Structure formats: structure tokens, C-alpha cells
Amino acid sequence: MRTTLNIEDGLLLQAKSFAAREHTSLTRLIEEGLSLRLRAAQAAPALARAPQLPLYAGRGGLQPTIQDTLSQRALLDAADGTEPAR
């Protein structure tokens, strides 16, 4: 289909130069650009519908008996309900 576009002069010169370097036509370059933009617009709403993750708003935290919060052994012992290994 034929159509008329109003394109800023500098942009048109860049596009023509790019099309020549890529050995393609200006029409094909414009079609590719439109296609990319339309696909991105269709993909964006799908990302926007990502489910909201639940947030824990309760109180708590680590047990006061855990002295070394960087020790995996101390955390595992606390989870098991056993005394910390010495």
C-alpha cells in the first residue's frame, strides 16, 4: 500500500544512509521499525499483568537464642529446635 509520511529531514537522511549501508530499501527499513515497535507494544501489557507477590506484614524475626546469624549451623539448629553446636 502506498502512503505519504512526513519525516524530519535529518532523520530521513540518517535512515537513507543506514538503508544503503544495510543494502536494503528505505521502505523495508521503515517496515522493520514499525514491526519491532508494534511487537514491543504487544509484549508490554503481558509483562504488566505479572502477578503480585504476597508480602508478609507480620512481626517476628530471628530467635534471640541465635547468636551468629551468618552461621548456617546456628540457623539449622534453631530450625530443628536443638541447642547450638559448640
Image (spheres, rainbow, N blue to C red):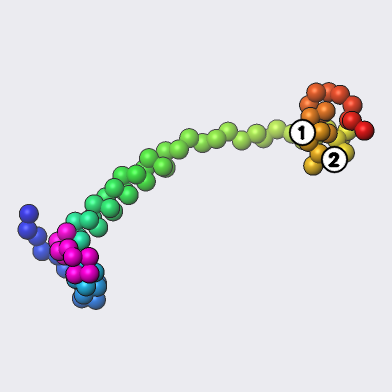
Residue drawn at the location 22% of the way across and 56% of the way down: 32
Residue 44, image x and y in percent? 37, 46
Residue drawn at the location 24% of the way across and 73% of the way down: 14
**Badge 1: residue crowd in 10 Å (few <14, some 14–19, many ≥20):** few
Instruction: Check contact, mark 2 vs mark 1: CB within 8 A.
Output: no
Tell me the kind of residue under disc 2: Asp
User: Which numbered tag is attached to residue 21?
Assistant: none
Tell me the quarter of the image containing the N terminus: bottom left
- Compare marks 2 and 1 and give the one earlier in the sequence: 1
Between 41 and 69, the residue placed more toward the observer is: 69
Residue drawn at the location 25% of the way across and 58% of the way down: 33
Tell me: 3 left or right of 18.
left
The reply to whether residue 43 is in sight is yes
Q: Name the residue under label 2.
A: 68
What residue span does the magenta drawing correspond to? 20-28
As displayed, is residue 75 above or below residue 23? Answer: above
Tell me the quarter of the image containing the C terminus: top right
**Badge 2: residue crowd in 10 Å (few <14, some 14–19, many ≥20):** few
Q: Name the residue under label 1.
A: 60
